[in-house]
Image: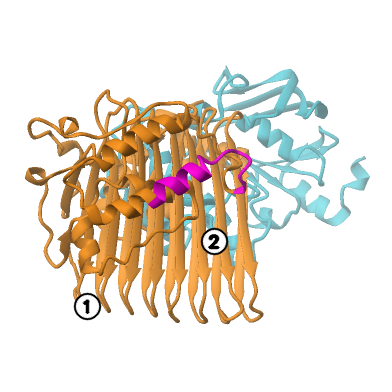
Amino acid sequence: MLEIKNLYGGVEGKTILNGINLSIKPGEMHAIMGRNGSGKSTLSNIITGRDGYMVTKGDVLFNGESILDWSPEARALAGIFMSFQYPVVIPGVNNTYFLKAALNAKRKNAGKKELDAVGFLKLIKEKLKEVDMDPKYLQRAVNDGFSGGEKKRNEILQMLTLEPKLAILDETDSGLDIDALKIVADGVNRYRNSNRSFLVITHYQRLLNYIEPDFVHVLIDGKFVKSGGKELALELEEKGYNWLE
Amino acid sequence: MSFTSFQTEFDKMMSRDYFSDKVHPMREEAFSKFIEMGLPTKKWEDWRFTNLSSISEREFRISEIQDAPNSDIDISQYDINDLDTIVIYNGHYQESLSSMPSGVQLVSGLEYLSKTNWEFKSPETSPFDLLNTAFMDSGMSFMVDQNVVVEKPIRMLFISAGLESLMVTPRIHVDLGESSSLTFIEHHVGDSTSFFQNESVFISLGQNAQLDHIRIQSNSISTSNIANINVCQNSDSQYYFFQYADGSQLNRLNIKTKLIGEGANCAINGLALSNGTQHLDHHIITDHLVPNCTSSQNFKSILQDQSSGVFNGRTIVWQNAQKTDSNQSNKNLLLSKNALMNSNPQLEIYADDVKCAHGSSTGALGEDALFYLRSRGLNVLSAKALLVRGFATELLDKVKHGGIRDFITDRFDLWLMENTKE
């Protein structure tokens, strides 16, 4: 599904990624672990197409096609989703309105009929239950006045609504207490199936207790220094990163 | 417009036999003071950012009978549900197109003066006040008796149309008796190619009275529109002002509110949208003269192309006005690198036990927010439109009357569609 080939790139003229190779097949969950500054966020920003991030070498393929020239919205419509580490507050934009606009952009792109207000409300109420979110958050402006945990739930709510093929969870565990973490993890686990893939980016092993990865990759200085199964995460938790340098 | 031209037009005005001789001395006095003062220049503190060449370099003539329409015109494009409308076309009252509101006394300027013992309100803070007194030729006045709640909003629809360069000078008085309430809308529209409107509005609110005053300024793009609004509030009265402006080459709003009775409250709000080389300018003075009053000013401008804007908000709290609670906010969104906003919120406080806040910010659309929306599949135009809409929502929501809010919101969305660029 996602193929990263010998990727070099960075931001503001600074090279941060130094030859990343990664292949994610349908149904797989990959975790990338690394310290601050190792290049985790640069990688997710390059995959999602954020302005200002450049690729100097290598390629990123999604379902066999190079996406590096695609706009962020084209990538989203193709099925790539990122749960933001810091979800953006958008004053004045109603959460329901935003979610409906995003879902309908996706449906329209897929040649499906756009949902009307009634149809959308029915759908979103189901999704809200899955992340145990109070419907009052739908009436608020996007992430405005949300606590850290509520923001992350709102991200997962968007994921469940937009049904991406590949979901990138960027530090989704940060700012979550243990109860919220379980709810978010349950939402992710229920969403897992043989066609959907995940890329989980995290500092700590904690999240991986609840979301079990098939593969774990350790990122240091923009390169994967070690890859393995879920047991690698436990080993990192125990030994830290230094033994890999 | 040169002084000679002003003089020619003034002489024409004075020769009109249908205006009362009683008013002539007031007109003459105001006109001679105006000539003394002259039009403002950029050297004047209150006009530093405002280029008046659209008035000073063009010639206008006063509106004559032939500038009224020959037959009824179609005003259906300006329909707003559930209100009474009084139509003024190039300064001429159109009785056949107007519906008579109930619950208010609707009187001409002259009748108003005779009812108020010829006590003439004539501030002289700017040349435009004087010019209004000298040239006032249209408008209507409303008087609401005490305890009367006027349910249906009243709209004055000012249409400026045609190819003639006209100068129209409306004067409006709104007097609300004790514990009465009214929603009053000024709606400025038209396809005129050259037009100078200099309007003065005098509002007096009795004890516990409430006025919702909405000004929709959608004049055609080549016009100059000056509004001088003076409000006087007695105790426990409420004044809510909202201006939606997307029209005119030059729109200058001067609004001064005097809080003279304890417990009075005013909220002065506005949303301005500009493109091309439009200049939309707001000067607001809120004057706290007594204790225990509350006031707020909340203005937002959205600027495209090379357009420019001014927010100059002043809140004055006099020594006696303890326990004043006031708030000023001005936020501006620049949609183009060439747009220019001058924001100047000012507090002038002479009392020591007050709560006053003010803030101002001007910037472009946030890159982070834009990326966030795009990463959810919205294209650049939709994402931008959504963000701009979000920026304005707070103010659009302040319009209480559903029909008016819908009308303004539709107009806003239309503007947004035409002015959102990649």
* Structural crowding at the residue carrying mark 2, measured as other residues with C-alpha within 10 Å and reported as few (<14), some (14–19) or many (≥20): some
Residue A236: x %, y % from top left: 82, 50
- Left or right: B340 as drawn, with respect to B109: right
Q: Residue at x 34, y 50 (%)?
A: B27
Image quarter (top left, top right, bottom left or bottom right) of the N terminus of chain B: top left
Q: Relative to A182, does residue B192 appear above or below in the rendering?
A: above
For the record, the magenta segment spans: B29-45
The CA distance from mark 1 to mark 2 is 60 Å
Residue B139: x %, y % from top left: 24, 50
Is A96 contained in the magenta span?
no
Helix or strand or loop: what does disc 2 sit on?
Answer: helix
User: Type of residue at label 2?
Assistant: Ile
Q: What colour do you see for chain A?
A: cyan
Residue A17: x %, y % from top left: 79, 29
Q: Residue at x 60, y 70 (%)?
A: B356
| Observer-nearest of A159 and B166 | B166
User: Type of residue at label 1?
Assistant: Gln
The figure's colour scheme reads by chain
Determine if residue B270 is in view.
yes
- Left or right: B234 as drawn, with respect to A173: left
Which residue in the protein does label 2 denote?
Answer: A183
Q: What colour do you see for chain B?
A: orange
- Left or right: B267 as drawn, with respect to A59: left
Helix or strand or loop: what does disc 1 sit on?
Answer: loop
Which residue in the protein does label 1 denote?
Answer: B146
The picture quadrant where one finds residue B61 is top left
